[in-house]
Amino acid sequence: MTVRVGEAASAPEFATAAKQLLTNTQLRRNVRHATNVIRAKRGKVVGEMPDWQALRESANAIKDHVLRYLDFYLEQFETACTRAGGHVHWARDADEANRIAIQIIQSHGETEVIKVKTMTSDEVRLNAALETAGIIPYETDLADLIIQLGEDKPSHIVVPALHRNKTEIRRLFMEKMKLSELGEQAEDLAAAARRYLREKFLRVKVGFSGANFAVAETGSVCVVESEGNGRMCVSLPRVLISLVGIEKIIPRFDDLEVFLQILARSATGERMNPYNSIWTGVTPGDGPEEFHVILLDNGRTTVLADAESRETLDCIRCGACLNACPVYRQTGGHAYGSIYAGPIGAILTPQLQSMEHSQSLPYASSLCGACYEVCPVKINIPEILIHLRGKIVQQGPGLSERLGMRAAAFAFASGGRLGAAQKLARIGQMPFVHDGVITSLPGMLGGWTAFRDLAPVPRESFREWWAKRPTKAKS
Amino acid sequence: MSAAKYEILGKIRAALASPGGARSPDRAADYAATPRAYVQAGSLDDASRLDLFADRLHDYNAVVYRCAEDELASTIAHALEARGKKRMVIAHDLPDSWLPPDFDFLRDAGLDYVALDESEGVLTGCAVAIAFTGTIVLRHSTGGARRALTLIPDYHLCVVFADQLVETVPEGTRKMRAFGTAPITTVSGPSATSDIEMTRVKGVHGPRTLDVILVLRLP
């Protein structure tokens, strides 16, 4: 089993990566602008909904219900999709999913694939696997195309190239699309992408997608998008492969009435995104003749096993928590070292990897709760962050920290011990006190003084003063 | 059962059997207990519902025409003239009564993608429309154009009958559910992107221009 979340296992710690990214003022300006725009739009279209909280409650309850009966719904989906002419595959981990996809593509003798934005394929690093197998993947979402052509990494769940500005994108397109001239406006750049991709849409025989929702009762798959590249990828090729995380299942078709209402408003601040494609198996005379679904675990069953943080799997990848997060808004997505950035990434990435990697991520938060407030499926992210921090401490290698805590517990347990400890500290702190404050401490304690001063232990504690105070005579 | 399926389902069952993971054996009752306090049915009268839909379409920069049923062909002619279109692709089963004279209508009998790409546009009806979100629901293949027809051409003229219009998204999805296994596309404005500096660009890969004719045929 190799659970893989992009390249998160080898990414530097959040604090290290963030420190460097914070010096990039251009990046910070781009991130701030993008998140401000989406937040304002989201606020407007969420504000006009009379039943927003009721929709959140329902979405949360439906997702929780699905997770409680996930085995049933997955099998129900498989049965319905198969009945409609689809093929369902199961993949335990990233490599297995990639192997299945490559086999399908090679069985048709094809060497090119058109892809509509799928985070899950980034998670399993499908593109790298395809390229190794001699298959060329074409990303067709505008932002993903910018990332792919620039050999860059996504920095946001919904708008992955928000860290790039027009000038950078123009230069990139001119070089990679071999254009001698190109206008400077966003319209010109979008038109260039249209021309570049159209020939591929009409020609390439294999399409690849993720899924926003997979309906158990009907076997239908739903892909939500804006540009029309999704419609191209799921309806024009002869063969379609959809990689679906096992948590994407919803019980009934009618449940779409909840999720379609909350997703676009939360993700892009639109009342409804321009296009939703919903298809069921194969339809003779319309669209792909062959349809494959790969149901992916890749650590999701591990997340499911912890009842306290299970609701992480409720996520519908709207990205609202990223835009709301005061930490993300400063650092951008790359600091998280994972394709899943921001608050949701901080809880999802380490859990998928059985808490063995990305352990700095649950600390990449001030626990302000803004993420919980905007989450359309009401995932209590702050509570899960604290839960995961607890897990890290329990399993953690921080022996000195644990010994320190144990010593502190021993001292605080009795007044006498506390008094003795304070006396010791008064002597121990002497070399570090300058002008009445401690500005720098050695070793692990330096973590505190790196960013703030510490008040020294006072000459006399309250208890000592209380014991010495003159007792008033009764009058 | 494949080894992978067996293992994944086994892990799910083990995970759900863990402390705190208990579930009631009655799945249907558990589902029925999910709260549904959101707005399900609309409350607008017919005229206001149409106005709301037209408003939403204007938000998307669609040109909206209104006409009576017997004016449909002439309104289609008017809309096509306004866009300078002469040759339009139509689905195999589009009613002849819709078609104005003096235009070329190319009935789809398996046109290839290149032919669609070179066409001037496509004229279709729809299956359902949702006023609250300005959404047009296309049901494909059976009783509608196949998906490529409303996707590859750069211009889409869509006819919506007033009795196809519902107010809320739940009212719309419930109608969509009855389509069975037919592919469905919902269209809420022309294709768009905000991927470059959050500047909204209308028209990327799907039809860059969408016009709508509202036919005032009421049940």
Image (cartoon, rainbow, N blue to C red):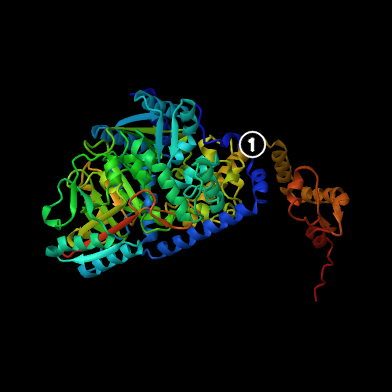
Subunit of label 1: A
Q: Is residue B171 visible?
A: no
Picture layout, residue A276 above or below residue A123: below
Residue at the image point whose x is 44% and y is 43% from the top: A313
Residue at the image point whose x is 49% and y is 56% from the top: A185
Residue that protrudes farthest toward the bottom in the picture: A475
Quarter of the image for residue A391 reads: top right
Q: Is residue A210 shown left or right of residue B88?
A: right
Give, as a three-letter code, the residue at label 1: Gly
Picture layout, residue B180 above or below residue B166: above
Residue marked by disc 1: A396
**Location of residue B215 in the rendering, given as x and y in whole percent from the top left corner:** 18, 63
**Location of residue A20 in the rendering, given as x and y in whole percent from the top left corner:** 67, 47
- The C terminus of chain B lies in which quarter of the figure? bottom left
Picture layout, residue B116 above or below residue B188: above
**Closer-to-camera residue (B99/A458):** B99
Q: Is residue A383 shown left or right of residue A396?
A: left
Label 1 packing within 10 angstroms: few (<14), some (14-19), many (20+): some
Q: Secondary structure at mark 1?
A: loop
**Location of residue A146 in the rendering, given as x and y in whole percent from the top left corner:** 50, 45
Quarter of the image for residue A248 reads: top left
Residue at the image point whose x is 36% and y is 51% from the top: A259
Q: Is residue B211 shown left or right of residue A153?
A: left
